[in-house]
C-alpha cells in the first residue's frame, strides 16, 4: 500500500459516497485511476465494506458497555456464539485476566442485563465484568496518516 492508497482510504473514510472524479482530484489522480485503485483495495481486502455511520443514541441504542468475559476454557472457537447475540457489536479474544472483550449496545440497562444473562449461556463462560460508558469523547476510523512518499 503506497502513499496514494493511504490518501484514498483517508478520503473514503471521510465520505465514501463521493464520486470517483472528486476522489481522484483530492489525491491527484484521474477518476478512472482512482476507481481502479479503489477496486484493487477492495480485491486485496483492505476495504472490507462500504457502510453508513449510524449514531447509536439517535437510533435508540444509547447504552454502551464493554464486557470482560471470563471462561473455563479457550474461547477462540466461540466466535459464532458471541456473534449470535445481535447487541454485541465487537468481540475480541484477549490476553490478560479475562478471555474475551465484547462491546455491547442496547437501549436500556435492563436489555444490557439480559445480554449478560445470555453471555452466561455460552459454553465455557464463567463470569462477566461490565463497564458502562457514561460519555464518549470521540470515536474515529482506522488512523491512516499517509506515509511519506518514496523519493525514488
Image (spheres, rainbow, N blue to C red):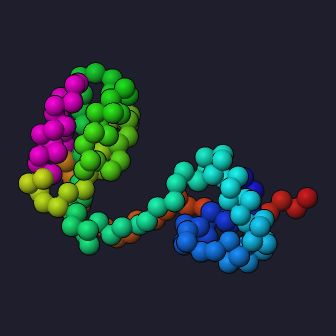
Q: Residue furthest top?
A: 73
Residue appearing at x 55%, y 72% in the figure:
17
Q: Nearer the viewer, residue 108 or 39?
A: 39
Q: Is residue 58 visible?
A: yes
Snapshot quadrant of residue 143: bottom right
Query: Does residue 144 lie above or below 113 as drawn?
Result: below
Residue 98 lies within the magenta run: no
Q: Nearer the viewer, residue 114 or 24?
A: 24
Q: Residue furthest left?
A: 110
- Across and down, in percent, residue 39 comes to 68, 55
Residue 120 lies within the magenta run: yes
Residue appearing at x 23%, y 24% in the figure:
124
- Across and down, in percent, residue 84 comes to 27, 39
Q: Is residue 66 visible?
A: no
- Across and down, in percent, residue 45 comes to 61, 46
Q: Quadrant of the C terminus?
A: bottom right
- Across and down, in percent, residue 146 comes to 68, 64
Segment colored magenta: 112-129
Snapshot quadrant of residue 121: top left
Query: Does residue 27 lie above or below 1 as drawn?
Result: below
Residue appearing at x 11%, y 57% in the figure:
109
Amino acid at each position: 500500500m503506497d502513499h496514494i492508497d493511504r490518501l484514498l482510504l483517508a478520503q473514503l473514510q471521510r465520505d465514501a459516497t463521493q464520486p470517483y472524479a472528486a476522489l481522484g482530484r483530492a489525491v491527484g489522480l484521474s477518476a478512472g485511476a482512482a476507481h481502479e485503485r479503489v477496486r484493487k483495495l477492495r480485491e486485496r481486502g483492505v476495504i472490507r465494506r462500504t457502510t453508513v455511520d449510524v449514531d447509536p443514541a439517535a437510533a435508540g441504542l444509547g447504552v454502551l458497555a464493554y464486557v470482560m468475559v471470563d471462561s473455563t476454557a479457550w474461547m477462540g472457537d466461540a466466535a459464532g456464539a458471541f456473534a449470535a447475540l445481535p447487541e454485541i457489536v465487537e468481540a475480541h479474544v484477549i490476553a490478560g485476566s479475562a478471555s474475551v472483550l465484547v462491546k455491547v449496545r442496547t437501549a436500556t440497562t435492563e436489555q444490557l442485563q439480559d445480554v449478560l444473562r445470555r453471555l452466561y449461556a455460552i459454553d465455557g463462560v464463567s463470569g462477566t465484568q461490565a463497564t458502562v460508558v457514561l460519555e464518549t469523547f470521540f470515536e474515529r476510523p482506522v488512523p491512516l496518516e499517509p506515509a511519506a512518499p518514496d523519493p525514488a
